[in-house]
């Protein structure tokens, strides 16, 4: 599973990638007059939207990250680009093809600093700092008018249902980024347990943290595979950089004590508070310290990133992996490869001693965005392109040319007389197409489909049939678990750029947080050291940051 988005606090710790001198606020899409770059509603644009393609074709520049090419395709000549020209009347000119994310950021930095021409359409990852720097550069237009006029119903409806998706993209009341939609609830945490161990030990699903502790004790001290206690560390977690992360996360444990760490949650009064300084975090740390002492957690967890934590589970040393619904796609195949007799199952998040329960929640349904250059001759073209993907590929119609996939011989083919999207049956299988916006996704469709399959219902639509073939039954069941607990998810409400005090003090605050938390977990500091950490956090800028975060939240959420 490719992870494009990163947690906001790690982005704030990155030294500013781009040095930009603001040259005024970006102009709106209609500031330039008729038939000039940035125009809404030019005759050519109207004709293209009426016909569904540009005729004659237009050229534009964009940014395309590395992809896997097969069957002789190249980055300059491939099945996607041939399709784009034939179907939409669009072709690339002067498009950037960076070799990596880092190279892209460096190239963008140099281009902005030197005044080099930027692409017409610039892809921006979920990085609030970078987004605000690009807005302040004056190189990009506000998209309010373009969005209102050209975005299709799917995108407009989702934006209306999730107004928070605009928070990172809004400045001075104007919207600057076209959101690229992602599946909602796709990264929500649940617990993946070794089901073969559960069955051999006759254990039931853990409803509480106390139940989970009993399971960990059995996994370690009565291991059904005959492993000695010093070979088993039941809970696989990552403590290297963040404790609220995408694999081996601890958000569910902090949630059992009424908070979610490393993010900004709403308090009882509707104000934002930093979850790591909530009193519940102290209780979670006390529990983690206890688990570390008992050997339920590996002593090297502070050195482990997410992949290393997952590896302890796939090698059989751990029996519990906190992860998303897509664990059956990765890393579970490695578990079966290493231990062919093993099996695994997704379990709901258990509640704490006082009945509290919660995990992180990515619910805005946005994975990245695209900004439009103020000099783009066809600013509306990205909407024509994205609309087509959403209307035709995100949930294809029966009998359409995309019923089985995007391109025959790539992500689907006819095998033994039947169409299939099974990668194991297709020679040179590839679904890494250089879509300008990434794969088209309707945010709630994925989880709804998996739940339907988990309920034993027959797949009917092309999309449902593709998911039934492409996703594993364990994946279906996991989605049902996630959606059965949808009300426990806690949203991170701060998605803006670093506040003034964050710029100067956040790195030190985060360093203090990680050092204090790890020392408490490892027993090098008493649990009560948390109280002094909170006092220091508040006096060293935390209180001021909290005030600034709430001022930002009120400004973007005001109706």
Image (spheres, helix red, strand yellow):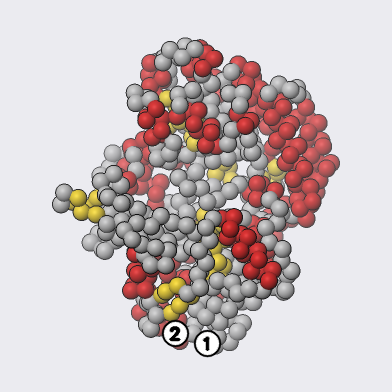
Is 44 placed above or below 439 here?
A: below
Q: Nearer the viewer, residue 542 or 135?
A: 135
Res 484 visible: no
Instruction: Check the image and name the residue furthest to the right.
Output: 539
Q: Nearer the viewer, residue 497 or 55?
A: 55
- Residue named by callout 1: 35
Earlier residue among tags 2 and 1? 1
Callout 2 touching callout 1 (CB < 8 Å): yes
Residue at 45%, 45% (x, y): give it: 1
Dividing the picture into quadrants, the one containing residue 134 is bottom right
Horizontal relation, residue 37 to residue 340: left or right: right
Horizontal relation, residue 146 to residue 434: left or right: right
Per the model, the C-alpha gap separating discs 2 and 1 is 8 Å
Quadrant of the snapshot with the C terminus:
bottom right
Disc 2 secondary structure class: helix
Residue at 23%, 61% (x, y): give it: 399
Horizontal relation, residue 320 to residue 525: left or right: left
Q: Residues within 10 Å of mark 2 (few under 14, many from 20)?
A: some
Instruction: Check the image and name the residue furthest to the front.
Output: 72
Residue at 16%, 49% (x, y): give it: 416
Q: Residue 428: percent from the left, percent from the top? A: 31, 51
Disc 1 secondary structure class: loop
Q: Residue 447: percent from the left, percent from the top? A: 40, 46
Residue at 35%, 53% (x, y): give it: 430
Q: Nearer the viewer, residue 186 or 547?
A: 186
Q: Residue 384: percent from the left, percent from the top? A: 43, 72
Q: Residues within 10 Å of mark 1 (few under 14, many from 20)?
A: some
Res 81 visible: yes
**Labelled disc at residue 222:** none
Q: Nearer the viewer, residue 539 or 358?
A: 539
Q: Residue 141: percent from the left, percent from the top? A: 60, 73
- Residue named by callout 2: 44
């Amino acid at each position: 599973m490719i992870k494009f988005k990163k947690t906001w606090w790690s982005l704030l710790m990155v030294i500013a990638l781009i040095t930009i001198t603001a040259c005024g606020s970006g102009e709106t899409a209609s500031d330039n007059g008729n038939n000039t770059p940035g125009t809404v509603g030019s005759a050519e644009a109207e004709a293209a939207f009426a016909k569904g393609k540009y005729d004659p074709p237009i050229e534009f520049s964009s940014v395309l990250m590395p992809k896997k090419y097969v069957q002789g395709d190249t980055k300059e000549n491939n099945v996607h680009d041939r399709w784009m020209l034939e179907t939409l009347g669009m072709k690339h000119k002067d498009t950037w093809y960076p070799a990596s994310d880092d190279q892209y950021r460096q190239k963008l930095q140099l281009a902005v600093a030197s005044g080099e021409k930027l692409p017409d359409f610039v892809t921006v990852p979920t990085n609030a700092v970078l987004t605000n720097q690009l807005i302040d550069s004056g190189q990009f237009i506000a998209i309010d008018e373009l969005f209102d006029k050209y975005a299709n119903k799917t995108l407009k409806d989702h934006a209306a249902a999730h107004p928070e998706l605009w928070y990172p993209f809004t400045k001075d009341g104007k919207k600057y980024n076209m959101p690229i939609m992602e599946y909602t609830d796709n990264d929500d945490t649940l617990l993946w347990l070794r089901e073969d161990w559960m069955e051999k030990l006759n254990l039931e699903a853990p409803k509480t943290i106390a139940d989970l502790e009993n399971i960990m004790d059995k996994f370690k001290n009565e291991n059904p595979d005959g492993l000695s206690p010093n070979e088993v560390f039941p809970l696989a977690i990552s403590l290297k950089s963040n404790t609220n992360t995408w694999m081996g996360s601890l958000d569910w444990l902090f949630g059992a004590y009424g908070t979610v760490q490393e993010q900004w949650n709403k308090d009882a009064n509707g104000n934002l508070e930093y979850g790591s300084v909530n009193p519940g975090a102290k209780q979670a740390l006390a529990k983690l310290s206890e688990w570390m002492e008992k050997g339920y957690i590996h002593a090297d967890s502070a050195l482990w990133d997410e992949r290393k934590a997952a590896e302890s589970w796939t090698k059989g040393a751990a029996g519990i992996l906190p992860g998303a619904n897509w664990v059956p796609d990765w890393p579970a195949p490695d578990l079966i490869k290493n231990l062919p007799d093993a099996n695994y199952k997704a379990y709901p998040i258990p509640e704490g001693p006082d009945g509290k329960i919660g995990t992180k929640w990515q619910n805005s349904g946005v994975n990245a965005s695209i900004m439009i250059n103020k000099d783009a001759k066809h600013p509306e073209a990205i909407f024509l392109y994205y609309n087509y993907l959403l209307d035709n590929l995100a949930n294809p119609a029966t009998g359409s040319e995309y019923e089985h996939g995007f391109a025959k011989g790539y992500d689907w083919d006819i095998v033994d007389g039947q169409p299939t999207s099974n990668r194991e049956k297709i020679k040179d299988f590839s679904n890494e197409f250089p879509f300008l916006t990434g794969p088209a996704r309707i945010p709630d469709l994925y989880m709804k489909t998996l739940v339907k399959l988990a309920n034993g219902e027959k797949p009917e639509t092309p999309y449902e049939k593709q998911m039934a073939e492409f996703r594993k039954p364990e994946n279906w069941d996991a989605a049902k678990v996630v959606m059965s607990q949808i009300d426990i998810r806690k949203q991170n409400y701060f998605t803006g750029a670093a506040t003034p005090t964050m710029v100067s003090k956040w790195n030190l605050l985060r360093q203090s947080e990680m050092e204090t938390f790890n020392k408490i977990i490892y027993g090098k500091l008493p649990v009560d050291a948390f109280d002094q950490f909170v006092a220091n956090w508040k006096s060293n800028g935390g209180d001021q940051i909290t005030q600034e975060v709430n001022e930002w939240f009120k400004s973007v959420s005001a109706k």
